[in-house]
Amino acid sequence: MQWLFDAWVAIRDFMELGGPVLNVIALVILWMWVLIIERVIYFRQAHPRAVAAQVAIWRQRSDHDSWIARQIRAGMVARLNRGANGSIPMIKTLVALCPLLGLVGTVTGMIEVFDVLALSGTGNARSMAAGVSKATIPTMAGMVGALSGVFAAALLARAAARAMKDADDRLATD
């Protein structure tokens, strides 16, 4: 149990070292990963059920060849597409937001460094170090969050495209 407490202290110290912008970055990364996990669960559980339901409705139709039937099928595919791509645009937005927030952290940290320079000159390196850490840690956190999110968003977009192609093929053959 001591390791859990030590981990908590290390995370708390890291968050304090990065300044208030790091808290915002952490919340954005947390929200992004909640949405990513939701999409993974959707593709494993809900999407196959939705496709099966649409295929069952399509099979119950007697007419599959008329213009109206093709429009109904296109509407079914569009509903499945909307479900498959649900929060992927929001994930991509949060990925793009992470480095921007890191840049805000860099600017606020450098402002602190310049304040120290203005008050004490260049001779107080210890006071400047706190501002430099507040400048570099949010930048690093934003980039790490963005890199992990870019990879996950690309995998999810590919999974959505593949799932839609499979759903379209199932509706076309039945």
Image (cartoon, rainbow, N blue to C red):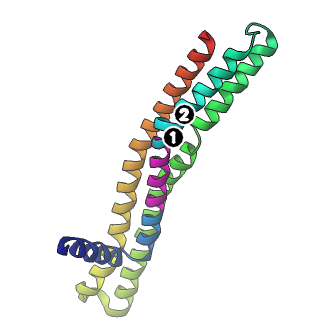
In x, y percent, where is residue 60? Answer: 71, 16
Drawn side of residue 92 relative to residue 59, left or right: left
Reading the image, the residue beneath label 2 is: 47
Where is 27 relative to 43, above or below?
Answer: below
Q: Residues within 10 Å of mark 1 (few under 14, many from 20)?
A: some
Q: Which mark is residue 13?
A: none
Most extreme residue toward the top is: 65
Which residue shows up at 54% across the image and 37% down it? 46
Give the extent of the magenta segment.
28-40
Q: Can residue 11 be found in the magenta stretch? A: no
Quick check: marks 1 and 2 in contact, CB under 8 Å?
A: yes
Circle 2 — which element? Answer: helix
Q: Residues within 10 Å of mark 2 (few under 14, many from 20)?
A: many
Q: CA distance from mark 1 to mark 2?
A: 6 Å
Which residue shows up at 27% across the image and 80% down it? 129
Name the magenta segment's main secondary structure: helix
Quadrant into which the N terminus falls: bottom left
Q: Amino acid at mark 2?
A: His
Which residue shows up at 57% across the image and 16% down it? 170
Where is 109 relative to 96, above or below?
Answer: below
Circle 1 — which element? Answer: helix
Reading the image, the residue beneath label 1 is: 42
Dot placed on the residue nearer the N-terminal end, 1 or 2: 1
In x, y percent, where is residue 57? Answer: 69, 22
Residue 79: quadrant of the picture = top right
Drawn side of residue 15 relative to residue 86, left or right: left
Q: Amino acid at mark 1?
A: Tyr
Most extreme residue toward the right is: 68
In x, y percent, where is residue 106? Answer: 40, 69
Which residue shows up at 18% across the image and 71% down it? 3
Residue 115: quadrant of the picture = bottom left
In x, y percent, where is residue 88? Answer: 54, 43
